[in-house]
Image (cartoon, rainbow, N blue to C red):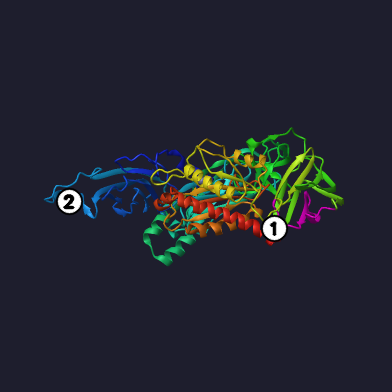
Amino acid sequence: MLAGMSASGWLAFDVSAAEVKDEIVVIYPKPDQRISAVDSTFILGHVPPKRGDWSYRLQINEQAVDVHPDGGFIAFLPIQPGAFKFQLDAFLEEKDRDYQSRIKSPFSPRLPPYSVRLSRELTVFVPEPLLTVDADTLVIAGDYKPPRGSLELRAGDRLAVAFRGTPNCRAWFSIEGVADSVPMSETPPRLQPYWGEAVFGAGAVPDSLKIRGIYTGFYDVSDTARIDTAQILYHLAPPSRETVLAEWLMHVSALKLHRYLLWMQAGAVEKPSSCRVSFNNPSYPFTVRFADSVQIVRHGPRKGYLSIFQPEGVEALAVSAEGDWYRLQLSQTQFGWVARRSVKALARGILPPHSYLTSIRTHAAADHVRVEFPLAGKHPFRVIEDNRRTIRVQLFGVTTDTDWIRYDFPDSLIDIATWSQPEPGLYELKIQLTSDIWGYDSYYAGNTLVFQLNRTPADVTRIRGKTIVIDPGHSRDPGAIGPTGYTEAQANLELALALKKELRRRGAKVIMTRHDDRHVDLYDRPAIAKVNEADLFVSIHNNALPDGVNPFANNGSSTYYYHLHSMDLARSIQGELLKATGLNDYGLFHGNFAVNRPTQYPAVLVECAFMILPEQEALLQTGKFRKKVAKGIAKGIEHFLKEYNHGK
Ligand SMILES: [Zn+2]
């Protein structure tokens, strides 16, 4: 299961696979769970397993559902918004005959091992999809995609607002004391994409979810606009008399015309936004200092990563805010977002460091080459892998004065290094290597930024002697849970132990992040790899799906990388894993996980099979399948090493 999906309720179960109860057990969803699906979702669990000639026939909401001999089942069923009930009924059958008909036979029936009939009800909550507001009433339903809390904006910032209301009307907004009657217009019907289906399914978005009546507008904050805190007031009025007449002539709907005429008498409606705004708050801008040791700078509040692993002490200028997030100005045109709680605001009048970079110097060591940037303070930075052999280091708030780049001459890892100043406040060093990027590290030594390029391990084409860290995902959290209650944490450990055996047999030095079901914190796993100076890192998982995605159409093996330098390893493992297991190809993914974000070595996460499918859950419990998976991954690593640098 993917780490990002843990909120969906998988963690709340703890079912022992060994226990056989004479009942229907539903593993997922749990009672009263909120299902974030659109029109269908899956339900999984088990009935007592087949015993002799006896087995259960199952139906859910009167639809027949296949039952695996071990009792596991999964179904993908239509759902309705609101409180939705699953009714599960299981009927015991002997061979192909119904127990009831058997009991009526003149022969004395054998006593059944289980109850003749089992039933269970499960109610979940399915949120109402966002719908078009009923056209019969003039109403503002509320904000559409509001910001995450209050907005603190400065001159030059743009405030974008949107609300949902009755379609085909006139709309505007006002902010007391600053802006009056700012026009808004109805947008073309908007789709409501659901990420689960987009990423993990076929990517379809049902047409019925297009909604009308979304009005948008914007306001560019001027120098003179100054408010401490205010609400945005939305206004909605019936269409103009001309529009009504034109429409009436086209559609000839007397009823509609009558309605419009009534609205016109009633006049406009208004409603305040849920969030508050402030313009040109005199405390902005100010400098913040990063307080976390692994600060992430993002492209938006809770949005994608711009830069990772920013050390404690780095400083940048906060220029505006949205809810719990500060917007930082990194260079003339580049901005990034950080969580308020992860930084410390400095006293007024303090600016972030500004450095002129005069010289860069490289230092060769046995297992790495360091590139050193002496600066006047700790600046935000970003590392970008352009391709297998080109990497760029960007420094924010730095201006070039670079007259010198001193190479450690005898060393050949760095082929060319060139500096540039793409814009004020952004310095860039582009480094071209003579071999594919293996891994790197970046840190501050005092005010010197050190970018360390790790060398390829010795005798790279062979697996023998390589330090490979295997990470069995989860524990004590169970991860995904299969229909009969087999946990992902257990499945991952069993697979990892099989992989350890395979890799040791091939001469690799194997380090496990856990050997048993003890708890290991997610962030301790990459740390274990770092202290053991891992050459490679493989995290073992087994998959589930987010609500609403069809498990029969979407399943199989998949492999995930984060940095470009891990992609070849991911591709190689994915190829060999498919050959070894014969499961469906669920795909090669760029995926953002804590365990594959480290930069020091190639790191991948493998989702070997789908826990939630009864057949794959059963396979995962066999030594034969585990060995196949282990051999596949081991061969994938071997293939990657052999092909590294195109085999040169
Ligand atoms: Zn997992």
Please give the range of residues in magenta.
410-438
Quadrant including the C terminus:
bottom right
User: Is residue 423 found inside the magenta-colored segment of the image?
Assistant: yes
The residue beneath circle 1 is: 388
The residue beneath circle 2 is: 102
Furthest-top residue in view? 347
Task: Examine the residues drawn in magenta and state their main secondary structure.
Answer: strand
Q: Residue 532 at x, y = what percent?
A: 66, 41
Mark 1 sits near ligand 1, with its Cβ under 8 Å away: no
Q: Provide the secondary structure element on which disc 1 rests.
A: loop
Instruction: For residue 490, say whether it is visible.
Output: yes
Mark 1: which amino acid?
Answer: Arg
Determine whether, in the image, residue 460 is placed left or right of residue 410.
left
Q: Residue at x 17, y 51 (%)?
A: 102
Considering only order in the chain, which callout, 2 or 1, is on the residue closer to the N terminus? 2
Badge nearest the viewer, 1 or 2: 2
Furthest-bottom residue in view? 250
Q: Provide the secondary structure element on which disc 2 rests.
A: helix
Query: How many other residues sit within 10 Å of disc 1, few (<14), some (14-19) or many (≥20)?
Result: some
Query: How many other residues sit within 10 Å of disc 2, few (<14), some (14-19) or many (≥20)?
Result: some
Q: Residue 626 at x, y = what percent?
A: 48, 50
